[in-house]
């Protein structure tokens, strides 16, 4: 089986013009991600784990290296060099990103926030809302909160809304940046179950987890950042 | 992506202009005013592409030329150079080469505009419903009942109280005036909409409703939009791609989240760093 994502020699630096400074974030990153498997990125704070995910999603412009992605049609393209419209097309249909933070329109109900990616993809509004409700139930968000805009939610509730929204559209490749950072153990278990189910369905995942326990439970491969050379280690199963 | 609009080399100089205008202005010169002849270079050599159903953000400070750009495309102003091609049903329309009658037709039927200042978009001497009817009368619609029905439908969609459709928009709140403008702009189902600082100066809660309405419309009707604003929050919520302008020039383009989180140009870095 071929990987769906191959990151080769990726580096990211930030040039801060105001201060005339160049700030290195990550360098010489090599990793592969397969359909139905989860690759975990580990390393100390500041090793540039989030930067790797953001480069793949093109929130950051990579400074060097290649990010080869095999799309649904079987074409391989370098995300580091993809046009803006190509990147938008992949975001709309194939690549999802769940971060720790929820950015959404004010005054929209939690249910609509979660349903939004499906509506944007052309799913009927009523169907999208029904599936959003199912996902919120799976992540134990109580039904009394569904009609409320998430702006006033607690950190954990917001994160569950964010996770529900990220998981609902079943992308081919899912990037997860500490998606369970502020969840209690019981809710974390629910999230782990949803992520496991998506793996079984064939979703390829690249994830950062704050807790080593989650790496042990979910990862099929572990890639360590912070060392300059290629450090791909197969997890022993 | 199916292209709906392609702009190349679009320029607008207010004043007589001189051979030194271009090199004497721009972001590096820190001005858009030519020191030699006093002309204002409001836009120079602007290229952009817009796909069907896409929202493109244009951001920049006052005087960056962002409003000039949409005014040129909506035929409010005449460009001093460049080309804009509008694509529809396999046909290409070279906008600035069209005769006046066909430009008017484009403007009335295929494009829509919502201005920051409702006085520019609405006629305050007639009712809210009348404003929409006025736009519909410029199409093939001529049956009173049909026109009134469509106006009701549009005002209901933009959440303007129907009991007030026969009142002049003069008596409306700022948020409601913007809703009437949006209803009027949408009257002819235009595939392309220009929004010029539509939420600037409105209360935060009203802003949120208008932004929500704009996104719903984009999802329902697949309307392509060019959104001009200096508000980074509006850009983040609405636009997939963003263009940054300064002194009439494009200085950076990219995916919106990339512009906001990994800006490349010194000016954009300063702009993003100083946002609240």
Image (cartoon, rainbow, N blue to C red):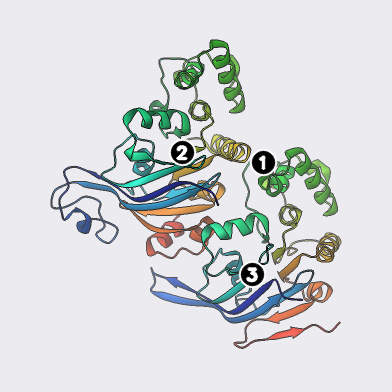
Q: Residue at x 45, y 60 (%)?
A: B273
Which is in the foreground here, disc 1 or disc 3? 3
Viewed as shown, does residue A2 lie left or right of B102?
A: right
Disc marking residue B92: none
Percent x, y of residue A157: 75, 53
Which is in the foreground here, disc 2 or disc 1? 2
The picture quadrant where one finds residue B105 is top left
Q: Which residue, given by chain and number where applicable, does mark 1 sit on? A: A108
Percent x, y of residue B220: 63, 37
Q: Which residue, given by chain and number where applicable, does mark 2 sit on? A: B195
The picture quadrant where one finds residue A234 is bottom right
- Element carrying mark 3: strand
Disc marking residue A69: 3
Q: Is residue A83 above or below residue B233?
A: below
Q: Residue at x 46, y 63 (%)?
A: B263
On the same chain, marks 2 and 1? The answer is no
- Bin the neighbour count of mark 1 within 10 Å (Cα to Cα): few under 14, some 14-19, many 20 and up: some
* Foreground of the two, B31 or A95: A95
Q: Are marks 2 and 3 in contact (CB under 8 Å)?
A: no
Reading the chain from its start, which is encountered first: label 1 or label 3?
3
Which is in the foreground here, disc 2 or disc 3? 3
Q: Is residue B200 visible?
A: no
For the residues marked 2 and 3, what is the alpha-carbon distance in whole angstroms?
A: 36 Å
Looking at this view, name the residue that lies furthest to the front.
B90
* Foreground of the two, B260 or B22: B22
Percent x, y of residue A200: 84, 65
């Amino acid at each position: 089986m071929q990987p769906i994502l191959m990151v080769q020699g990726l580096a990211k630096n930030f040039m801060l013009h105001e201060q005339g400074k160049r700030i290195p974030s990550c360098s010489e990153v090599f990793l592969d991600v397969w359909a139905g498997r989860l690759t975990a990125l580990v390393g100390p704070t500041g090793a540039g784990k989030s930067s790797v995910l953001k480069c793949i999603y093109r929130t950051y412009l990579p400074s060097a290296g290649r990010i080869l992605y095999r799309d649904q049609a079987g074409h391989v393209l370098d995300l580091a060099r993809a046009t803006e419209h190509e990147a938008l097309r992949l975001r709309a249909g194939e690549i999802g990103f769940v971060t720790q933070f929820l950015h959404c329109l004010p005054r929209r109900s939690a249910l609509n926030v979660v349903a939004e990616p499906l509506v944007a993809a052309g799913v009927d509004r009523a169907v999208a809302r029904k599936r959003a409700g199912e996902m919120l139930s799976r992540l134990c968000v109580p039904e009394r909160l569904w009609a409320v805009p998430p702006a006033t939610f607690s950190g954990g509730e917001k994160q569950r809304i964010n996770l529900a929204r990220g998981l609902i559209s079943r992308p081919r490749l899912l990037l997860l940046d500490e998606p369970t950072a502020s969840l209690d153990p019981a809710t974390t278990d629910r999230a782990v179950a949803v992520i496991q189910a998506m793996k079984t369905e064939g979703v390829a995942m690249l994830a950062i987890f704050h807790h080593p326990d989650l790496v042990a439970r979910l990862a099929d491969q572990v890639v360590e950042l912070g060392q300059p050379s290629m450090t791909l280690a197969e997890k022993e199963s | 992506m199916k292209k709906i609009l392609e702009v190349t080399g679009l320029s607008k100089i207010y004043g007589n202009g001189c051979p030194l205008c271009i090199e004497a202005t721009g972001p590096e010169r820190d001005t858009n005013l030519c020191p030699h002849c006093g002309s204002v270079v409001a836009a120079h050599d602007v290229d952009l592409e817009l796909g069907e159903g896409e929202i493109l953000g244009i951001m920049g400070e006052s005087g960056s030329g962002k409003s000039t750009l949409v005014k040129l495309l909506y035929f409010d102003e005449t460009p001093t150079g460049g080309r804009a091609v509008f694509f529809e049903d396999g046909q290409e329309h070279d906008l600035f080469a069209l005769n006046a009658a066909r430009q008017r037709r484009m403007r009335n039927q295929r494009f829509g505009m919502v201005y920051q200042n409702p006085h520019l978009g609405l006629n305050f001497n007639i009712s809210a419903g009348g404003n929409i009817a006025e736009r519909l009368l410029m199409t093939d619609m001529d049956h009173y009942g049909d026109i009134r029905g469509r106006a009701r439908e549009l005002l209901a969609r933009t959440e303007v109280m129907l009991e007030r459709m026969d009142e002049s928009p003069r008596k409306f709140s700022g948020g409601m005036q913007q809703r009437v403008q949006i209803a009027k702009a949408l009257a002819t189902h235009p595939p392309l909409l220009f929004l010029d600082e539509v939420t600037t100066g409105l209360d935060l809660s009203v802003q949120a409703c208008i932004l929500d309405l704009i996104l719903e419309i984009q999802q329902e009707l697949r309307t392509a939009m060019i959104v001009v604003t200096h508000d980074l929050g509006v850009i983040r919520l609405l636009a997939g791609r963003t263009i940054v302008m300064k002194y009439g020039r494009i200085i950076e383009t990219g995916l919106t989240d990339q512009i906001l989180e990994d800006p490349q140009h010194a000016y954009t870095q300063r702009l993003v760093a100083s946002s609240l």
